[in-house]
Image (spheres, rainbow, N blue to C red):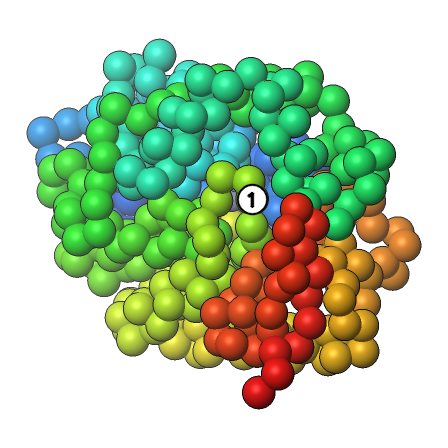
Amino acid sequence: MDITGTAQHEAWQARALPPVEQVRPNLWSIPVPIPHNPLRYVSVHAFALDGGGLGLLDTGWESDESWAALTGGLAQIGAGIDDVRGALVTHLHFDHLGLAARVREASGAWIAMHPADASAVARISRESAAAFVASEVAFLVGLGADREDAVSDVGPPDRLESFTRMAVPDRLLEDGEHADFPGWRMRAVHTPGHTPGHLSFAEEGTGLFFSGDHVLPRISPNISTSFAGAADPLGDYLESLAAVRDLDPAEVVPAHEWRFRGLDARVDALTAHHEQRLTELLTAIRRHPRSTPWDLAAHLTWSRPWDQYERRMRIFAVTETDAHLRLLARRGLVVSSGGPVPTWTLAVR
Ligand SMILES: [Zn+2]
């Protein structure tokens, strides 16, 4: 894997925000900060369109600071928010879709996503934050959490208010369709796993592969179960990795961190990482049969001691463990007891 986004990588090491960069003729990357988040920023990409105006890929986290960075970045390339004709959004997470509502309001731009994530956003927007919290708590209790732990980890509903006001997209893009970016050939590649409707984009003129959060150069994207999510998100993810492995793009342009070359090597490393986690989980189940995902997560190795995990981090860890369990079950290696709080045991073979 070769790092090609060297300015992005240097900024990362200096703990600074990278510069606005011209990536190709008529194509720029604009780093938009994510407040209080270890990912630090999302790279919004701006495409100059034939016939005038701009297309955006992703929009940024919904906050005044992020909005200022986006509009400031557009000013730096001699454009304004009212030049935006349309925004493609790789997936429904708040750092990608968050600012889409403001972009649409300020410019009249269309917003396009894959139908699976679009319908999830529509569903979230119909729900109250309180209902959302109740569903998440019930889901965690079903994974073996004490109700008190689940309530404290999920946190109060007001934290989620803004999530229920995200922009519902007005256009849908299916796998293989080309986005309405005149002058470009942006082919949508459905890459479910991180979310059910995650889209990557293969730009057929430049050979660039816009990988969203599907393939990142440093971290492994979170693959977890949720109360309204896919049945086997890790199985989906590994299939989506295999599907893009041999695209051989000129450069990979991810939504976080830095651009790089060597998609196949990165896909192999991510696949190996999950296979190793699956093996580790099998060992934990052998030692601790009839355990819930909540209990099993405590027996896996994490980036810091398990008893320091709390809140969102613990939810991510437990739902990620659940995603690995579901794939092991699909492979016939483990069985669940069923019932309201299933426990897991090695399958008798
Ligand atoms: Zn992201």
Q: Is residue 291 something that shows in the picture?
A: yes
What residue do we see at 27% from left, 33% from top?
A: 112
Q: Position of residue 344 (x, y in %)?
A: 68, 66
What residue do we see at 84% from left, 34% from top?
A: 148
Q: Position of residue 259 (x, y in %)?
A: 44, 59
What residue do we see at 44% from left, 72% from top?
A: 267
For residue 191, above or below residue 332: above
Q: Is residue 7 something that shows in the picture?
A: no
Residue lying farthest bottom? 349
Residue 247's image quarter?
bottom left
Residue 89 vs residue 56, the one in the foreground: 89
- In the rendered structure, the answer to whether residue 130 lies left or right of residue 106 reads right
> Total of numbered circles in the picture?
1
Q: Within 8 Å of ligand 1, the CB of disc 1? A: no
Q: Position of residue 108 (x, y in %)?
A: 26, 15
Residue lying farthest top? 105
- In the rendered structure, the answer to whether residue 79 lies left or right of residue 345 reads left
Q: Residues within 10 Å of mark 1 (few under 14, many from 20)?
A: some
**Secondary structure of residue under mark 1:** loop
Image quadrant in which the C terminus is located = bottom right
For residue 113, above or below residue 4: above
Residue 155's image quarter?
top right
Residue 159's image quarter?
top right
User: Which amino acid is tagged 1?
Assistant: Ser
For residue 177, above or below residue 59: below
Residue 34 vs residue 337, the one in the foreground: 337
Q: Position of residue 37 (x, y in %)?
A: 67, 40
Q: Which residue is mark 1?
A: 226
What residue do we see at 76% from left, 63% from top?
A: 291
